[in-house]
């Protein structure tokens, strides 16, 4: 189970590193809007000017934490809202990416499960 944890942690970390680095350095071309709802949503995200850089910065920090294996407990909590939003965006707006988004979300839940002993103190009264 320890090897599976390391594999999942590193794969998720590399995925977040790739997504954030390609965003900041404009390595990937912009995705074509698949429908009008996604186009409107994406336009709103870009119009806010701070939301995407904030999300990608958190992805970068959490990706580094996952790959190095340090502060994984904190990275799991920080990245959970982003993975939930990735899952919902893909479910409601672009179902083509739903398998990858689902695997990302399940991987995040798996890491939270594996590091659950570190979270126990948060839930004690």
Image (tube, rainbow, N blue to C red):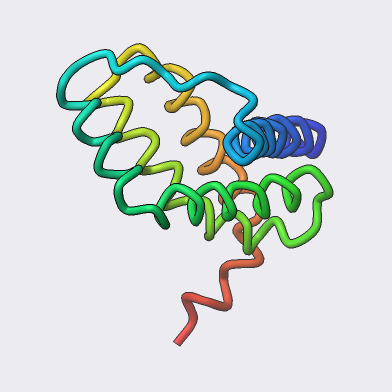
The quadrant of the image that shows the N terminus is top right
Give me the residue at 43% from left, 26% from top. Answer: 102
Give me the residue at 57% from left, 40% from top. Answer: 110
Q: Quadrant of residue 22?
A: top right
Residue 107 pos. (x, y %): 56, 35
The quadrant of the image that shows the C terminus is bottom left
Residue 123 pos. (x, y %): 47, 75
Give me the residue at 70% from left, 56% from top. Answer: 72
Residue 81 pos. (x, y %): 41, 52
Q: Is residue 116 left or right of residue 38?
A: right
Give me the residue at 23% from left, 24% from top. Answer: 93
Measured along the vertical axis of the image, is residue 122 above or below residue 39?
A: below
* Count of numbered labels shown in the rendering: 0
Residue 68 pos. (x, y %): 83, 48
Q: Residue furthest bottom?
A: 125
Q: Is residue 37 left or right of residue 100?
A: left
Q: Is residue 86 left or right of residue 67?
A: left
Q: Residue furthest left?
A: 36
Q: Could you say which is closer to the camera, residue 112 or residue 23? A: 23
Q: Is residue 5 left or right of residue 94?
A: right
Q: Could you say which is closer to the camera, residue 118 or residue 98? A: 98
Measured along the vertical axis of the image, is residue 34 above or below residue 46?
A: above
């Amino acid at each position: 189970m320890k090897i599976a944890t390391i594999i999942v942690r590193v794969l998720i970390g590399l995925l977040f590193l790739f997504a954030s680095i390609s965003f900041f350095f404009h390595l990937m071309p912009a995705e074509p809007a698949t429908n009008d709802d996604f186009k409107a949503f994406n336009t709103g995200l870009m119009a806010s000017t701070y939301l995407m850089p904030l999300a990608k910065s958190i992805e970068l920090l959490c990706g580094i934490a996952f790959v190095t294996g340090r502060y994984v407990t904190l990275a799991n909590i920080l990245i959970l809202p982003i993975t939930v939003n990735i899952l919902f965006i893909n479910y409601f707006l672009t179902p083509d990416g739903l398998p990858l988004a689902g695997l990302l979300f399940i991987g995040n839940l798996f890491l939270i499960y594996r590091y659950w002993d570190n979270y126990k103190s948060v839930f004690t009264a």
